[in-house]
Amino acid sequence: MKYKKNDFLIDNVEAKILAKKYSTPLYCYSLNKIKENIKNFKENFKSIDPLICFAVKANPNSNLLRQIGKLGLGADVVSIGELMKSLKSGISPNKIVFSGVGKTYEELNYAIKKNILLINTESKSEILQIEKIAKIKKKKVNIGIRLNPNTDANTLSQISTGKKENKFGVSEKIFLDIVKYVKKSKYLKLKCLSVHIGSQILDNAPYEKMLRVLKKIINKTKYRFEYIDLGGGMGIDYENKNKKLNLNKYSLNIKNFLKSFKSKIIFEPGRSIVGNSGFLISKVIYIKEGYKKDFIILDAAMNDLIRPALYNAQHRIIPVKKNNKKAKKIYEFVGPICESTDKFSILRNFQKLSEKDLILICDVGAYGMSLSSNYNLRPKATELLIQNNKVQVISKRQSLKDLI
Ligand code: LLP
């Protein structure tokens, strides 16, 4: 993914050709980048040989799931829809974990029927519900318990999950009570302790603290957990400032931690697998003069990519074709939706843009399309998967007929 002369290429294909052929807004993913991310992830954690379950919520496209499954990953799912889609995409049930605070009877029943690796439970009520279903089915069901380690992930408050005020997991006290209960259950087999402290984490310290809390609590249980599921959350470098989590250091910390416990580690990464593989190509519809700035009105909007509006998240914007002319004004990149938060970025010193020019919004492979909507009755965009000149439509733009 680079410029050749002045044209941006995604896996050797010119972005402008894609925009012309498939129209905009257009999601494009580089399969080579996904493969590279998976390889890096595996290499960094090689010494602990974890089971890597891709967090499907980051990008549930079936074609991507199929590719990710072929590369040996399992799936972390949070709904019956994600579970069905993962199975349909060829991911084996014994590599699937089911997370989430509010799994319904129907969802649990289905997961139990499919014999997935683990249901990571988040409350005593959910455990009782599983026990009830297991009894009817005369089965022993493998479960995990999600602990809330009361650890600040130092990330955006909206995507932090590991503090005691968050709805996720159970406190130490409840965790210890539940362990006692499950140990005696005829229908439940306690296999796993799970945690997930938040997303877009760029600092190793919260993970180190989390491991210290786990060690203390596991010692108190005197129980051998076959699996310890450390969740996901590994952040990516959205701002291109080389700010990255040190995965190797994290791996060493885990190795150290495992000296006390003989457990298999599970990870549930989403963003770090697909985030930087995706681009959203968009066309400038109009340029409107505003007070001390120009509004660059794009054909992509918050319904296509809601992260900036929802979390004030920053995604780099770059031109599809460089022209080496500097804009005189500040540019505010906005979408056409009737909301003031429908804006992507305010940039100084961008290159001079004209109407009909194309731009790319970067790092949208995770929580881009998966958080998209039909707000303002706008159809969802086409998604392309690209590898070495080969372009595949992996999801077609919704037609107006579908919507109306
Ligand atoms: N495991 C669990 C239990 C989770 O709740 C999540 C994400 C993950 C794994 C994957 O986390 P990752 O490796 O992708 O950070 N919409 C937000 C992100 C919300 C993440 C929710 N849970 C965003 O666009 O930043």
Image (cartoon, rainbow, N blue to C red):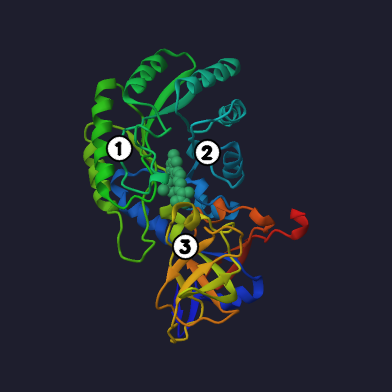
Q: Which residue type carries mark 2?
A: Val
Tell me the tag on residue 277.
3
Circle 1 SS class: loop
| Marks 2/3: CA–CA distance | 23 Å
Locate residue 314: give its quadrant.
bottom left
| Marks 3/1: CA–CA distance | 30 Å
Q: Which residue type carries mark 1?
A: Thr
Point 75% across, 59% down: residue: 400
Label 3 environment density (alpha carbons within 10 Å; few <14, some 14–19, many ≥20):
many
Label 2 environment density (alpha carbons within 10 Å; few <14, some 14–19, many ≥20):
many
> Which is more N-terminal, label 1 or label 3?
1
The reply to whether callout 2 and callout 1 are in contact (CB within 8 Å) is no
Q: Is residue 271 visible?
A: yes
Label 2 residue near ligand 1, CB within 8 Å: yes
Residue 91 spot, x, y in % from top left: 54, 44
Tell me the tag on residue 78.
2
Q: Which residue type carries mark 3?
A: Ser
Q: Considering only vertical position in the picture, is 6 above or below 268?
A: below
**Residue bearing mark 1:** 151
